[in-house]
Amino acid sequence: MKLVKSLFLGSAAGLIAMSGAQAADLPVKAKAVEYVKVCSLYGSGFYYIPGTDTCIRLGGYMRIDTTFNGGGAYNDPSWSGAAGQDTRQRNQYISRVRQDLDIDTRTSTEYGVVRTYFDATFNWTTGTDSIAGGGASAGIYYAFIQFAGFTMGKAVSEFSTPWTGYPGGNLTSYLIGGEDDVTGINQLAYTASFGNGVSGTISLEDSQAYDQSQLLGVVAGAGPAATYNTAATWLSGTGMGNPTNTGTYGSFYGGSAVPDIVGQLRVDQAWGLFQASVAAHDIHASYYIPSNETSGHPSDAWGFAGMLALSIKNIPTGPGDSINIDTTFANGASRYVIGGVSPNSFSMFGGTSAAGAFQSIGFATAADGIFGPGGQIEKTNAWGVRGGYNHNWNPYWSTSLFGSFSALSYNGAGKALFCAGMGTAVLGLGTSYTCNPDFKIAQLGVVTRWTPVQNLTFSGEVLYTQLYQNMSGTTAPVSAGGATPVAVYQFKDQGTVSVGVRAQRNF
């Protein structure tokens, strides 16, 4: 017993001694812990970066889309390519998964707030991304700095409205009828605020990505007739771009010479918004024969576009209901009407009642202009209107009705050049069919959304697109490209319906 007691007391004494030694090793004062603090200067979600006076907010969304009877992009109508032909080579449905991440930083300075914004997406899309090809694709939507009224970098065009191409909160990115570069373009802009919600902006913007259409041209052919910039596969939706005697050209545009010059005046009020925008667009051709600089070239021409937009908030139909509408006219700047992400050429196939015809075809080509050997650029005219009405049934359900109408026309000289090219590529001009490249496109859609919990929304959309073209009659037997046979085709207006569903979680 004495032995056990001695061992116990000895162990206790040892533990006390060890504790004292460890206590002696502790620092006199613990280091201060630097906690992340909420920054309330710029709205919810901002925090101070530790050790700085800069506030940061991280955000984004996860989105899953599926489109039925869509085109090749994922939520565009079946208005070109294999989808427009409606052959077995098309995808009957297209799905896409997207993760979006954005970083917003702001710092107060003597010059005002310095802001940086970055938005990147990671996507996996049916038909364009594959496991074998490396999995997903990535993109940068926005990357810009704002300082003392200046915006420098990749941002939405100053010509655009706040709703860009989504006046009805639509799912489709292909509601044409106005400018749409929702994923941003490079720019240098300055915005002045005049008070009471009135502001003005002037901007220099890179037109190549979204706001430059194609420039059609005539080249010297090897045969007795000139060969125009009309593709042998003109009906397939690949558009004008494969002159048979001079190689392959997507367009007769030269390199970018002058950025688009954009001006905007905006009035933001509690009742809504009014905006007027203008843009000047340089049409800079390459050469009469693109493969030969000694062939000469037409002089540059200036195109322009103008837009008026109106948004009315909290209309009497319900709390939070709104109407958004914009209308645009363009001369030599067709992308400001036939939206930045839409194709330059449309070709939609359907049934026919014409004797001897295999199918009918609706055909349309958008361009900023057209020119011939030794001639100058003949500019096109385009106009469009689009809008949306948004209604909240209750805090969980909402519906939007949206639509657009667009038109593009060539002047007399431009029609003559275009139709001569049609005659070279498509037999029967003047005998079995007449040529008129002017066209119109109407679109009407509805989308309904259910938000069962905050920041989680399920949506369903139906979109109808109608192409009104001005060709008439039937072709001689020609190749329509793709899997379609060499046959007679009837020119006829065409329509298509696409359906989209979406699940999106914002954070």
Image (cartoon, rainbow, N blue to C red):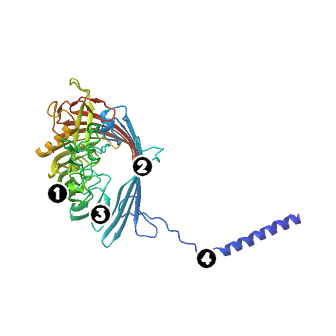
Residue 427 x, y percent position in the rendering? 20, 34
**Label 2 vs label 1: CA separation?**
40 Å
At label 1, the amino acid type is: Ser
Answer whether residue 284 is visible to the viewer in this image: no
Q: Which residue is mark 3?
A: 151
Question: Which residue is more in the foreground, 427 or 397?
Answer: 427
Name the N-terminal-most of marks 4 and 1. 4
Q: Which residue is mark 2?
A: 137
**Label 4 vs label 1: CA separation?**
81 Å
Frontmost of labels 4 and 1 is 1
Residue 144 x, y percent position in the rendering? 34, 61
At label 4, the amino acid type is: Val
At label 2, the amino acid type is: Ser
Question: Which residue is more in the foreground, 177 or 222?
Answer: 222
Q: Which residue is mark 4?
A: 28
At label 3, the amino acid type is: Thr
User: Quick one: which residue is furthest to the front in this view?
Assistant: 223
Name the N-terminal-most of marks 3 and 4. 4
Q: Which residue is mark 1?
A: 299
